[in-house]
Image (cartoon, rainbow, N blue to C red):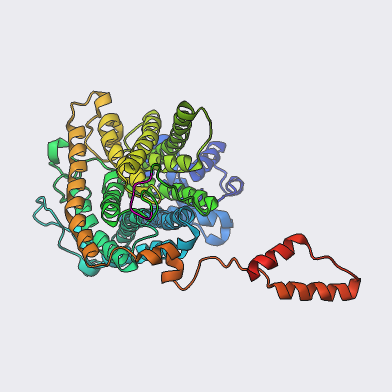
Amino acid sequence: PVFHLHIANFSTEITETTRLHSDLKSWTEHNLFRLHNLKDIDSKMSFNETIFGDYCSSAVADQAPDVVALCQVYNLATDGNASAGELSDGINTFFLLFSGALVFLMQAGFAMLCAGSVRQKNVKNIMLKNLLDACGGAIGFYTIGYAFAYADNASDSKTFIGNKNFLLLSFEGSGGDWIGWFFQFAFAATAATIVAGTVAERCQMAAYLAYSLFLTGFVYPVVVHSIWSGDGWITAFRDDPWQGVGVVDFAGSGVVHMTGGATALVAAIILGPRKGRFYDEDGNPLETPHNFPPHSVALQVLGTFILWFGWFGFNPGSALAIDNSGSAETAALCAVTTTLAAACGCVSAMFTDTMIEKSSTGEVSYDLTMAMNGALGGLVGITAGCSVVTPWAACIIGIIAGWVYIGFSKFLIKMKIDDAVDAIPVHFANGMWGVIAVGLFAEPDLMATAGYNDFPGIFYGGSGELLLCNFVSVVWICAWVFFLMTPFFVILNALGMFRVDALEEEVGLDISHHRGAAYDMSGAKKEDVEELMEVRASKHGKVEVPKEVANAAEETTA
């Protein structure tokens, strides 16, 4: 409960019966946020509302401080429908503010994960790009992106793109409008930042800014409009959805992750691999692709945990409200399925990779990268169906997500497509799997609770309408992104704006583009160390220079 009330105060000031005291205690502890729904409370307990109302209307001086706090909530909740609505709006606004902040925190997770995955010479570059993702996403989504994604359609007809609320000029100033934009902006920024890791260590800053704005301002919003807007042509949020159900992508396996992952795939193909990844200096294919080890495993793990934490805003927050039992149930289920899918994806990917290694080499090792990306793959895979699948189904989705990640990662290497952080297998491949999984595992009662038509998945006796709708959404997202982003990146590449110079890439983007390396690894000067030892010797007799200090000084001088 929000207020920790000492209910004993009631027993001294209200002497009606012991039963009333017990009822008040239960009511204050378990129904504080539901005071506006008094009929529901009355149906569950023999609560004498008149006595309590009379008591709260007595002089404040006669009441204990904790009782005053309770009565203030009571009076607010019983002050007519308008006050009840205000309380509901406030709760929902705070819920979206908190959830949106968690989603925005995922930007820090992406930054840490990418920074740890690249080589030391490119850390500042990738960190700056992650920061600019948030900036570009905010500007693009504010100016035109939100208008294209969500527009009021007075004719109630299906539309391809929105055309209202550019620069938020048509907003009426309500809290719901503002917080809605903030929450959706956080999702748009996530779609853009997926691309950063894939093209790391070789992409020009100008190109990065250009595609970040284009993606959040136009490409992504059109996908959002088609699936999440009430005017979309394949949305589930209409009285007459396509095939009777429409596309069920609750939190964005397809809308967010597939869109960002598909963009990353196109970018990686056109940009080409990093120097030395698949070819030697003469351009001859390497027998075994060269792996660039991450410069900081600690940052990778930190980034993974931050992303996992942020996903509890991404998925449960997509309920969009928390002031009623249905939304609360949906958000709570999302938290459970999100946790289980991530855990199962992590274990699945790591141990599957271990078994593959043992069967091919006879050796056994446990790859941390597989564990981290397996967990992220499970998170992406459950995002579409987190509100409509049961916990056991979430475990299966997570396990398969680990396999999808491994298979697609190996496929990219075979095709000589260089993804610096394996974002394409995690987001694109598992985004597809997550959308398809809804058509298999959706439970009809959970569908109804989450606000959809109660069409079941195949494993619950469904006849395939839901699976068909979600399959069409996969095809639609791929076609839309490939159609727009392919010529976009080709033009950037033709203009010489996409890839950095070969020498700059070899030296590292931190030095060539950002005024120096990310880390100052220099030690003490040799002459300073010698002077310090001389001073100490003059005070304490002969002092030997520690071997480690001498070696460090020599390395610095060299």
What stretch of residues is rendered in magenta?
Answer: 281-286
What residue occupies the far right of the structure in this picture? Answer: 541
Q: For residue 229: magenta?
A: no
461, 362: nearer the viewer? 362
User: Which residue shows up at 47% across the image and 28% down it?
Assistant: 355
Q: Is residue 11 above or below residue 263?
A: above
Q: Residue at x 52, y 60 (%)?
A: 59
Question: Is residue 382 something that shows in the picture?
Answer: no
Q: Is residue 224 visible?
A: yes
Q: Position of residue 61 (x, y in %)?
A: 56, 61
x then y, percent, for residue 550: 73, 65
Foreground pick, 261 / 185: 261
Q: Is residue 285 magenta?
A: yes
Q: Main secondary structure of the magenta part?
A: loop
* 286 sits to left or right of 69: left
Work out whether 11 lies above or below 119: above
Question: Vertical placement of 251 versus 348: above or below?
Answer: below
Quarter occupied by residue 471? top left
Q: Nearer the viewer, residue 82 or 387?
A: 387
